[in-house]
Image: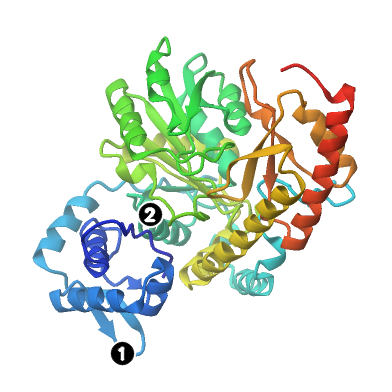
Amino acid sequence: MTTFYLPLDRSDDVPIHRQIYRELRRAILDGHLRPGQRIPSTRALSLELEVSRQPVLAAYEQLLHEGYLEGRLGSGTFVSVALPDELLKATSKRTSTRAPASPSPAPSGSNDGLGPFRMSLPALDLFPGVLWARLLARNARALTQAQMAYGDPAGLMSLRAAIAEHLRTARGVNCEAEQVLIVSGSQAALRVAAAALLQRGERAAMEEPGYPGARAAFSAAGATVKAVPVDEEGMSVTALQRLRGQVRVAYVTPSHQYPLGTTMTAARRLALLDWAYQKGAWVLEDDYDSEFRYVSRPLGALQGMDTHERVIYIGTFSKVLFPSVRVGYLVAPPSLWQRFVSARMALDLFSPTLYQLALAEFLREGHFARHLRRMRGIYLQRRNALLAGLKRHCADRVTVHNADAGLHVAVLLAERLDDAEVVRRMASRGLTATPLSTCYAGGSKRSGLLLGFGGSDEQSLLEATRVLGEVLTEALLTPTAVTPL
């Protein structure tokens, strides 16, 4: 059982219980919820959706009556194994597009870099380490000789199945386990995708500003990287269309744009998908921290809107668990599967089996869903502490650009401040941050800071903003800190 992506529109005239019924039924018809799959209790779903329990009960009762759900005494509520004829037709149509089977396996500083504002760092202090150690030990003791040998380059099937189920229900991704490729983090996924999709000299487009790691992956593949500006709706598809020459790949972070935090609008998403279809191009969707959203429920994935299989979806466990777990994944369209597996084998053959075994159990037994729900509340508190501290200590020296989601906040500095110099001054005071200017490929750059908040508690963040305020005051008063952009 996992968290649910179940869009509700509270401004809609349709009653909430009808919306819940409609979306659950649609998830079953579309194959996102499978026969025999357990769904959350009415109490858990009401908490997840932030609604009273009554409309959830009403929706479940209707689905039970119509035969889409079945209750099992003492076990919970499940998608019916004996499904209505209409549902059987819908699921048989979807499962016919599965990817081919995988090929046979082949023969730090004073604070250790964990100081306040460190980017991409989750709450390591709150990870259930004892539980994780128990899962690792249990699987280590039970390792078979086959599991100790070379593994499937695509990854452990039990983990791929658990990830596919999570993505279908929580992110609205259309995928089967056979389309999930396990890699050692999202950076490895980018390298694999670049090798599979790009020839030397071909063009890849990415957001400006954008994730430097993606730019590095495309450049390593010999591609020519083209910067496309981002506005309040996400990547500008109009600017993308104006690029000269054929663009083979467009890299985007639509749910939480890196680094500015913008969410790509539905209209812009549809325009991007139409561009990819018309041009025969591919879209790389990096969904690096979409599980954490604070102003609304998590948004569905761009891949789930794609009707022409032009999107490759990338995800990672580094932000939701811990970075050194080194497990990420991508979802490839069936037409690209063999190409991606070959590129993955060329990278490092396969991912370590023991962590895959433990992680598969972590997901399958519900620990992942519980941890995710808990961390959403924790990160909301930490984000709020950061924003309160910035308002109290830095209000006249920084402008918060976006704080709607994720584990970092982008703030803009006065143009006369060199953000790299500010970061150097922060480091001397025990603070770790990232200059916004490093995310630009072109000459026109905005001065700002990327402030991570996931890895520090509220008191540490409040104290860190006080120190940041002092650093900014000193920088503004020091002529050597002023450089033209």
**Placement of 205 over or under 190, stated as above or below:** above
**Which quadrant of the view contains residue 37?**
bottom left
Which residue is at 68% across, 48% downward?
Answer: 452
> Which corner quadrant holds the C terminus?
top right
Mark closer to the observer (2, 1): 1
* Residue 18 percent across, percent down from the top left: 21, 66
Tell me: 255 left or right of 83: right
**Where residue 330 appears, x then y in whole percent?**
46, 44
Residue ranking furthest to the front: 396
Amino acid under disc 1 = Leu
Q: Is residue 120 above or below residue 195?
A: below
Give how far across and how far down residue 7 sits, in percent.
33, 57
**Helix or strand or loop: what does disc 1 sit on?**
loop
Q: Residues within 10 Å of mark 1 (few under 14, many from 20)?
A: few
Query: Image point 46% across, 69% down: which residue?
Result: 364
400 left or right, relative to 389? left
From the image, tell me which residue sits under label 1: 73
Amino acid carrying mark 2 in the image:
Ala
For the point 79% across and 19% down, the residue is 483
| Mark 2 closeness class: few <14, some 14–19, many ≥20 residues within 10 Å | some
Image location (x, y in percent) of residue 227: 53, 20
**Residue matched to label 2:** 177
Quick check: 261 left or right of 485?
Answer: left
Choose between 118 and 368: the one closer to the eye.
118
